Image: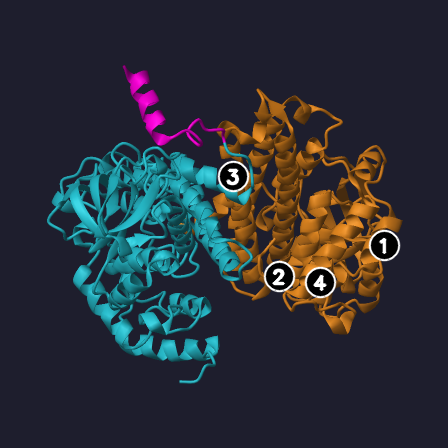
Amino acid sequence: MSDTIEPVEDFRLRARRWIEANLERRSAEAENSHRPDRDRDRRIQTMIFDAGFAGLAVPRAYGGAGLTLDHQRVWAEETDAYVRPTGYMVSLGIMLPTLLDHGTEAVKQRHIPRLLRGEESWIQLLSEPSGGSDMAGALTRATRRGEAYVISGSKMWSSNANYADYGMCLARVNWDAPKHQGLGMFCVPLKDARVDIKPIIPAQGGEPHFFIEYFDDVEVPAEYVLGGEGDGWTVAQRLLFHERSATAGVAYGYGMGGGESEGRSSWRLNIAEIARRYGSIHAPELAAQIADDYIDLVVGMQLGARINAGTRSGKLEGHWGSLLKLGLGIDSPANAETALAAAGADGVVWTDGNAGGEVGLNWLRVRGVSIAGGSNEIQRNIVSERLLGLPREPGEDIKAPFSELMKARSARRS
Amino acid sequence: MRFDLNDDQEMLRQTARRFLEKEAPIATIRERGGAPEGFTRAWWSAASELGWTSLAVPEPLGGYILSGHAGQDLAVVVEEIGRGIGPGPFQPTAVCLDALTRADAPREALIADVLAGGALVTWAFGEPGNTWRPPEFGARAERDGSDWVLDGVKAYVEAGAQAELLLVTARAADGLVQLLVPARTVGVTVIAGQSLDLVRRFAEVRFSQVRLPADAALTAAPADAQVERQLQLALLLQCAETNGVVERAFEFTVEYMRGRHAFGRPIASYQALKHRLADMLVRIHSCMATTDAALDAFDAGDPDAFRLSRIAKAYVATKSTAIMGDLVQMSGGIGVTWDYDLHIFERRVAVNRAVLGTPELHRAAIHQLLVA
């Protein structure tokens, strides 16, 4: 193999030929499904790996293709109309690049090839029952014991933890250091018998997407610590940067703007279709609201394309993914409310069994998008502080030892 | 501003910005506010010499092809005009040039004169009572032998009192016709008007039994498709201008909030305020995204430009007005004073909101598409 990198447009043609011959076009049904199909994802990811298209920007030493992020972008574009193994988005779009940045050599050699083949799936373990947004306030404990650490505590709001193999877990190693400095990031084996994983049933009922994990002295070898013992917050920042980049459709992710069209958006109902189905498309009192909702849908996708173009050209940082997440977090609940208006009583009262209630259940479900993955308020902080460069609110929790913050908190409660 | 401008477009943008900052700073705009005319012909000639309007014209007719996407290139200039609240009839000139170059016999001498900033031609399109839909127009042109006879009233005609020539869109027996009418023709009455904008003047123009030669019509065939094309271009340049206005106003308001202290720290550090700025940034980039997407469709001759241009106008006009209101709120008391510049920016946004049809009107067109 020569050292010259395959030109991106040559790669595009080669990828296109393979995709057309091997991947399946997305059907309307598949497009509307929110449920991950693990077996299907595994099968497709293995095919992609065997054909040499997995981890295009990952060094060959770790089982990748040794190409560039431009090749990865072209791959995302070319696969847009096809069934993709979206169940590996977190593993490959967020966890893998974090591992590349901060993992020990041994762990990278061992696990990155497995991630690329779809044999392993990794997740992030950041939020806790005591705090969702304030992740640096983690109470999960990591204690050094010989050549390993022992983790105890609990994490919450982890997506698809039920079938994950490892989780990157933010845990406190030093209680006398200031809040952000006493943390480590540990790769915790989730199939371990000392890990108990419970589903969180969502408000709309049905299949759980999020889980809560309890760790009862789970052992993590020292080589499974990312960065140094006290570098957890730095690693977490990097992880979140990769998450925003994946959202913005740059780097390793397929992107939030990518893969969505007017007919299929996982967080929005097509309002014209809903209004037609429920007989309200001609209702004069709804005309303005329906048209505005449709306009917001189109503009939201145009915004995704704009930000994706900016991040991929290098003119915008990955943090700009937060702008897209915020837009989605504002517009999607509004869309769900418009759908309630368009469906009227038939959206919340139905006689057709499990097929009914789509509009009402969607309204219950969609509020999640303005909370999960960093609430709208957190995204507003990121947009104003990182994109606009505005000052932070002063916090009382930056310099004091964490143990003192804990004492002050209990004193206020008593 | 799009993120994929090429080097030539970037150069065009910088040149336009420098020219506007030097030749038409806000202090000048304030001075012109009291004058009967919003811009001087000398200013407009100087702007024309930069080649701004030639971007709308193909090279054989004396124009200049910058990127091959005329809509994009014109938008680069007009966004800068928006940032500086620049004077001058850029958008109607670009639209009229588009019509002149697509006439049965392109008006080469006139085009050259317009490009040099000599003759001023503007588009007489809308009619009194917020009438912007051609099927509802009252202006009619009838054949009398080989002549045309024009009757009716046009309103909201930008620079109508300064233009030597009017491009009038009227209904005829078999569709729309576009007539080139010298303002001094017998039977033409121009009533100069004012607007909320400090330097943009609009006129009402009445036509009573105005007799014109056969070649006053730009095309022999009905002009419906060309009129739609002109409306798309006008709407999108208007949106791009509004985007420039809002972007600049947002920038200086954020700067003000960084420097303004209250209760011991910059007001820009309070989440109650900076969270609103974050929401505004989402909308500002959304406005730019929808404008650029529609311009791309326009430049590609994509029939979807009809839908995308209405979406852009409906979205940009609504959001920009809301953002300007919020920026006033962020500025506090100074934001409602004459001496602070913010109202100068608000004024242009409000005029652009309504001229060429309100967002409500264009939203109704979108609703029609959904119902169909």
| Distance from Cα at disc 2 to Cα at disc 3 | 25 Å
Please give the residue where the numbered disc 4 appears in the rendered image: B56
| Chain of the residue that carries numbered disc 1 in the rendered image | B
The answer to which of marks 2 and 4 sits earlier in the sequence is 2
| Distance from Cα at disc 4 to Cα at disc 1 | 17 Å
Whether residue A206 sits left or right of residue A167 in the image: it is left
Q: Position of residue B54 (x, y in %)?
A: 76, 63
Q: Position of residue B312 (x, y in %)?
A: 54, 49
Dot 4 crowding, Cα within 10 Å, few <14, some 14–19, many 20+:
many
Numbered disc in front, either 1 or 3: 3
- Which residue is found at the position 62% from the left and 41% from the top? B246
* SS for callout 4: helix
Dot 3 crowding, Cα within 10 Å, few <14, some 14–19, many 20+:
many
- Magenta span covers which residues? A393-414
Image hue for chain B = orange
Please give the residue where the numbered disc 3 appears in the rendered image: A384
Whether residue B179 sits left or right of residue B353 in the image: it is right
Q: Quadrant of the C terminus of chain A?
A: top left
| Distance from Cα at disc 2 to Cα at disc 4 | 18 Å
Numbered disc in front, either 3 or 4: 3
Numbered disc in front, either 2 or 1: 2
The answer to whether mark 1 and mark 3 are in CB contact below 8 A is: no
Numbered disc in front, either 4 or 1: 1
* SS for callout 3: helix
The answer to which of marks 2 and 1 sits earlier in the sequence is 2
Quarter assignment of residue B255 = top right
* SS for callout 1: helix
Scheme by which the image is coloured: by chain
